[in-house]
Amino acid sequence: MGAGLLAILAAFMVDDAVTGACLLTTHGAAEQGARWLSHYGDWPALLLAGLVTVAGLAAFRKFATGRLLLLVLLAGLLTGLATIPIHCAFGRTRPSATVPQGFYGLRCQSRWIIGQYPFSSFPSGHTAAWSGLAGVAWFRRRRWAVVFLAVAVAVGWSRLALGCHHFSDVTASLVWGLAVGPWLGNRLEPWINCLWSRTGLPAA
């Protein structure tokens, strides 16, 4: 955890430089790729693709793998969704916000800003979900974790490239996901096992 906090602090120190360097200012293949990653890296697409994959694994009688993927999927998504209260509490401006950059908390210019897009930058929910998947999978299926972490980095880049987040937002999300994901996975595992057994599907 200490290393994660140091990484976040270091990210704040180079925030403007790295965020500016990653920002795409021209239209082309890189921008299209960033938009694709940003769109399909969000939780609705991830949830749909994950559930379809779990169903496919069950259909091919890969029950243990399907049950594990369901655990990783739900714990990872909850890790990402858990960033919403943090967005609201910090009220950090996105790079594209029209007000001066900063952390505004719950109010700005005498009005409530809870949940408003321009003030929901810290941390990145997209990146937190994918790094949460990696965190959950790390102690269960290491190869999955490496793939999920690579996607988390790619999705994080896309959010920087499109001007949706600061570098420190993405860095904090990576730390959050890798720390919170395993904790959530451990607590959800008994519930997932119980849910799976109630469907009548074999455990393995």
Image (spheres, helix red, strand yellow):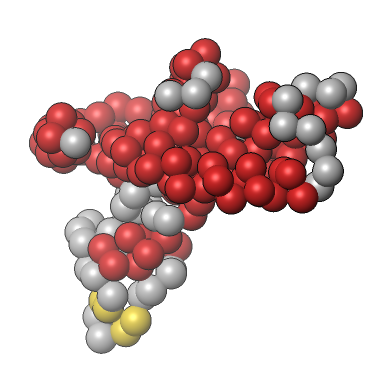
Asked if residue 204 shows in the view, the reply is yes
| Residue 195 drawn at (x, y percent) | 69, 50
Q: Residue at x 43, y 56 (%)?
A: 82
Query: On screen, 33 above or below 5?
Result: above
Which sits in the foreground, 125 or 34? 125
Occupied quadrant, residue 10: top left
Q: Residue at x 54, y 30 (%)?
A: 34
Which sits in the foreground, 157 or 142? 142
| Residue 50 drawn at (x, y percent) | 69, 36
* Image quarter (top left, top right, bottom left or bottom right) of the C terminus: top right
Extreme residue in the top direction: 143
Q: Classify residue 52 as left or right of residue 169.
A: right
| Residue 71 drawn at (x, y percent) | 59, 39
Asked if residue 161 shows in the view, the reply is no
Extreme residue in the right direction: 59
Q: Classify residue 3 as left or right of residue 108.
A: left
